[in-house]
Amino acid sequence: MTPQQPLSYVHPSPNSPWGTYLMQVDRVVPYLGHLARWVETLKRPKRALIVDVPIELDNGSVAHFEGYRVQHNLSRGPGKGGVRFHPDVTLEEVMALSAWMSVKNAAVNLPYGGAKGGIRVDPKLLSIKELERMTRRYTSEIGIIIGPQQDIPAPDVNTNPQIMAWMMDTYSMNTGTTATGVVTGKPIHLGGSLGRVKATGRGVFVTGREAARRINLELEGARVAVQGFGNVGAAAAELFGQAGSRIVAAQDHTGTIHNELGFDMADLIAHVKATGGVGGFKGGDAIDGESFWDLPCDILIPAALEGQITAERARRLKARLVLEGANGPTVPSADDILAERGILVMPDVICNAGGVTVSYFEWVQDFSSFFWTEDEINLRLDKIMIGALRKIWDTADRHQITLRTATFAVACERILTAREERGLYP
């Protein structure tokens, strides 16, 4: 008799985040050997918590927000993954993001499982005090499943070191001890790590540099287009600029800009800090948002939200290399088209793993109360990212598969080996 599947897992849309993840898992099954008997473990989150987050607004009224914390898999260690505040957050999206965190952490061999959290809210509509009250209430609600050895949240979309400080303080007040290791991405003076803010963008650059060498693409003079100009996209763009590349296009929620000669990165970053986005930047021409996908470039960095590279857009791309700074930016049908067209895709689960790697460093430093220099952080990050990528590339070459399937093969083997060796209890 086949057990009844929970409603959340039944027939998701193929291009939804969870549907995309399930298709990625199905593609890796032929490379799992005897571990394939455990594959259903990967298709079912271990734990999903939905919480009501009521707060009193500044005007005295009460507002309710829906929050989530999903722990996808804990076989290799405590859960690890960010918290996002966004009006489009759903349980299915958080499930997929938590699953990708399981794969990402295993791909770089960090001693973590995968988790993710979020609140369905537009934080721009809240005052600072309202944002603090919402963050603290959410932390209290999910406090029953998080902890330094249980599940460690971190910043994600629309969350930052201040949000992490409130989360850490709330958890600490509720447990009666200062627990700096309960979150990562904290302010430096509260146990945060040097190098954390730019770590994800640095990981995108490091993996991109290694990929460029493999396909004989010179970074000097290479044209780079970046979608999403927050911490990830801006940091990656800055590093590519320092390597001699030209950042010729940028897109975010404020607009799309283009300059074939390349932007002055110092001016662009200053403009984004002052205005909140790339829109209105005088050093480039404003163009239609959809035209972004038609621009000739050598390297494309999607660093915004999931599902951006559709099959239709994949047919139009004029890049040689795609570096996935965002989680799940390419749908499976687009993946196939890019592979057929000979466009190399560096998948999110390795490409943007720099952030969680330095989060791991922060967690370790918090436990030891001994902190490293930024140079030490960057050297350790580069070594881990390059070592992980080499194993993934060897797997891809051996099986003649894409880097995404190879990354899943490496990661899922590690996850399911842990599952098999731990056994089932009771």
Image (tube, helix red, strand yellow):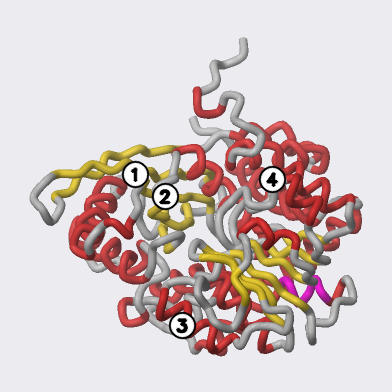
Q: Earlier in the sequence, mark 4 or mark 2?
A: 2
Identify the residue position indicated by label 3 in the image. 194
Q: Tell me if residue 301 is in the magenta stretch.
A: no
Residue 169 visible (yes or no): yes
The CA span between labels 3 and 4 is 34 Å
Residue 150 visible (yes or no): no
Amino acid under disc 2: Gly
The CA span between labels 1 and 2 is 8 Å
Task: Report the disc number at residue 206.
Answer: none
The CA span between labels 4 and 2 is 22 Å
Which percent across, then down, holds residue 87? 39, 48
Q: Mark 4 vs mark 1: give the one in front.
A: 4
Q: Residue at x 35, y 37 (%)?
A: 50
Which percent across, then down, holds residue 28? 77, 42
Q: Earlier in the sequence, mark 3 or mark 4?
A: 3
Task: Report the disc number at residue 117.
Answer: 2
Q: Earlier in the sequence, mark 4 or mark 1?
A: 1
In the picture, measured across the screen, residue 203 lies left or right of residue 230, that is right
The CA span between labels 2 and 3 is 24 Å
Q: Is the N terminus in the top left, top right, bottom left or bottom right quadrant?
A: top right
Which percent across, then down, holds residue 310? 70, 47
Identify the residue position indicated by label 1 in the image. 67
Which percent across, then down, holds residue 347? 71, 58
